[in-house]
Image (tube, grey):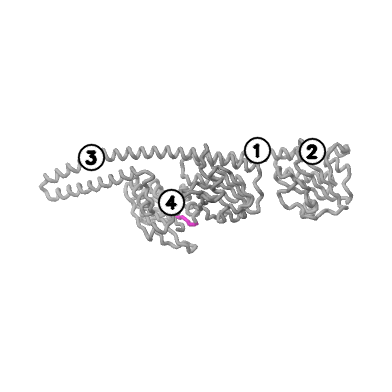
Amino acid sequence: MSVEPGPGGTPNPDDVPRLLEAMRAVGSGLRLRSTLERICETAAELADARYAAVGLTAECGDGLAEHAGEDTGGQAVRWIGRLPDGYEEAGGTAGAEGIRPPPEAGFLAVPIRVQGESLGTFYLAEKRDGGPFGEHDLDMVRVLAREAGIAVGNARLYGAAKRRERWIDGSVAVTTALLSGGDAYEALQVVAEQARRLSDSMAGLVLLPAAAGGLEIVAVASEHPSRALGLVVPPENAVAGQLLAGKAVFVEDAASDPRMLADLSRGYGPTMLLPLQSGGRVLGTLVMARAADARPFSDAERTLATQFASQAALALMMAEAQRDREQLAVYEDRDRIARDLHDLVIQRLFATGMLLESAQRRSVLPEVRQGVGKAVDELDVTIQEIRTAIFALQQGPAELPTRLRTRVLREINMAAVPLGFKPSHRFVGSVDTVVGELTAKNLIAALREALSNAFRHAGASRIDVTVDATVRLPDEETGVRLTVTDDGVGIPEGGRRSGLKNLKRRAESLGGDSWYGPGSGKDGGGTSVVWEAPH
């Protein structure tokens, strides 16, 4: 029997206390799932039904809840059978096609509405006394259906408010990370992780425009290990074209969609690909992918994710402008330092050298003349080194070398200024020909981090840098290994290790690893940092 809630009869006065208590119980919570469970239990008690379930429309979210009596083993869903057209259950297990309760068991269905909007349906099956459902049961369930409509509506609004709050908190975390002035890779990793968490996805990815066109994956947050980092979606790909044009792409099943890259979409189902755009400029793409058997993204989730992507893009643009200002200040400072070195320091050293040469000519003692001559030679070497430093300071970004060996040497030379000495270096294998650009870029970042840590914390007097392109990784794959060893104070117990964690995360994203151990100081003092990844 399927009925509409209407005037009907009036509940028995003896049942009014039960009904009032039932209405109080139904309206006592705000969380949708617990509200549905209370509604089912209350309906079963009022109608003395063995099985009860609530099926919600798709817009309401949680779909189907059941109240099952003793030893039913979830029979309520199976007794109800296929839900009427227009209703669907998120749980996806409501009765298989063709399974219906026997006629003698009794069956009652009452729509749940609030302010004319259909929210779902009550389903009750099998009276405990074996008889059919009567008008009295119908009247009781009708009253409960009205209260349930209000309760479900309130729970739905509460759930929507909590979801918006979560997305807003996620946007704040992303903005803070991007504007903190820290490592850009870490900031983008925060964007990917927040997107994955907020959308209940299996993976979150950030893609930025690649130098040769298309989109390159620069950050991955996934429940499982991923080798997607560095993968480039070519510009001729249809999805990449839409994203670069500022259009969002929603995919129902990424694994079977012909537009998606097989290496990127394998194992994924519902997927959102949203352009990171601000001020009419597309800065990149944010991808949120659920598992193949996961529920699709709702309209509300798509809207919240789009707003999140817009906020992330704005923060990304502000961070970029901030980095440009900081970079400009650095270049201006470097120009000033270069001028001071050239106009003041070199000139004074040159004048001092001339004075020493004059004193050398006037001296009659051979040992004095020899010592002064050696000092003049040292001054000449110092002047040449300062001129080399001036040239390095005056180099712009476009002039940076591309060969890995040269980039490593440049980092070592730049570190020598704050360190007060030049780290030693050693190369093993053809580092310039076998190491790929993605690995090389991350290796340079790892070297910069290791040298920075040695300068700020180690108090070292010697640093050795080794780049070995002939190592064999644990999975029998060939790779490159960077080792930075110092004779400093070592890593204290309980000290911060955020930089070392960054190195390890960067290596693992490429399928490699990073660790640290004792260095080259006396009695095992100092620190040795190792970073390795496939070519």
Query: Is 365 displayed left or right of 186 in the figure?
Result: left
On whether residue 306 falls in the magenta region, the answer is no
Which structural element holds mark 3? helix
Q: Earlier in the sequence, mark 2 or mark 3?
A: 2
Within 10 angstroms of label 3, few (less than 14), some, or many (20 or more) residues? few
Image location of residue 295, percent across then percent down: 66, 49
Quick check: marks 1 and 3 in contact, CB under 8 Å? no
Q: Which residue is mark 4?
A: 441
Q: Earlier in the sequence, mark 4 or mark 1?
A: 1
Residue 191's tag is none
Placement of 245 over or under 507, stated as above or below:
above
Q: Which residues are magenta?
A: 511-516
Residue 348's tag is 3
Which structural element holds mark 4? helix
Q: Which residue is mark 1?
A: 161
Q: Which residue is mark 2?
A: 146
What residue do we see at 76% from left, 35% from top? 115
Residue 494: in sight, yes or no?
A: no
Figure quadrant of residue 357: top left
Assign the magenta stretch its main secondary structure: strand
Going by the numbered disc 3, the residue's amino acid type is Arg
Which structural element holds mark 2? helix
